[in-house]
Amino acid sequence: MKTSTEIASIAYHVGEEKAIEMCAKASFDAWDFSMFSMCRYDWETGKAQPSTHPLAGSHYAEFAKKLRRIGEDNGIHCNQSHAPFPTTVGPIRDHLKRAIECTAIAGGSICVIHPGNDYELQANVDFYQELLPFAKEHNVKIATENMWDWDEEKGHSSFAACATSESFLDHLNGVNDPAFVACLDLGHAEMKGSGSGAVNMIRALGNHLQALHIHDNDLLNDSHALPFTMKMDFEAIVAALREIGYAGYFTLEADQYLYGRNADTVFAGVKQMADTARRLADMFGK
């Protein structure tokens, strides 16, 4: 079982180029191409913001090629990517084909693209079916992900697209294309009030499940913490993955783990992340 991690939290400190080098040095097998800087979203104003990042400019393809080359020079490859979100925002939606293209250039085979949290099923089906021909031209699969909203009155998450096994399967069956697959966010699945539980969702998704976002939480908040530091039962989760014959990567999305560090201590954190991912992979192997 191979391991990977999102690189956004590392790149925040040292940039994407150095982030990939660190992933390789820490002994990850692959890197997850985080593309949020392609079109940034301001959660306070609810609007997309202009970006000066190379992914937002006219030389985005050259930048993706550069990252691929850095990875290959260091013996590591891109396994998947994450497109900008929320995808219901016009300027961000306009960048989704670019995200798919960059996934292909970097060598990734899956691009995770969020559904509209509050869209009706058919609206999300239409959204993905519009993107799939372009993705297939680039030999990239699109993965949808289980989402959540927040109920302020109850103090916990609430239903959003793909949050439950039934909703997830409705989306997969509605699109009905082998190039449209599932990325299960394990932390989202464990949040009180929305998900069906990671183990139940793994079993329900079966061979649709081709990518993971792995992190830990307190079973209430979307903490994106390092596995084994909070309350999720990774023994049961890994056993369920083994049960369905999961054949994808163990990809961390523990992006809160490195926040608060400085550039001098980032690598130590990346090494701990790699060791944790390997611990999970070894559990699967046993």
Image: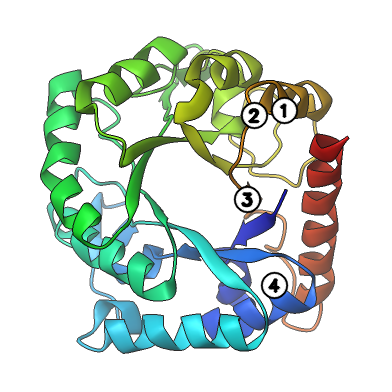
Gap in angstroms between the C-alphas marked 1 and 4: 25 Å
For the point 62% across and 55% down, which residue is it? 255
Amino acid type, mark 4: Cys
Residue 251's disc number:
3
Residue 245's disc number:
2
Gap in angstroms between the C-alphas marked 2 and 1: 5 Å
Gap in angstroms between the C-alphas marked 3 and 1: 16 Å
- For disc 4, the marked residue is 23
For the point 79% across and 84% down, which residue is it? 264
* Mark earlier in primary sequence (4, 2): 4
Residue 76 in the figure: left or right of residue 169: right
- For disc 1, the marked residue is 242
Asked whether residue 228 appears in the rendered view, the answer is no
For the point 23% across and 67% down, which residue is it? 98
Q: Which structural element holds mark 3?
A: strand
Mark 2 residue crowding within 10 angstroms, few (<14) / some (14–19) / many (20+) = few
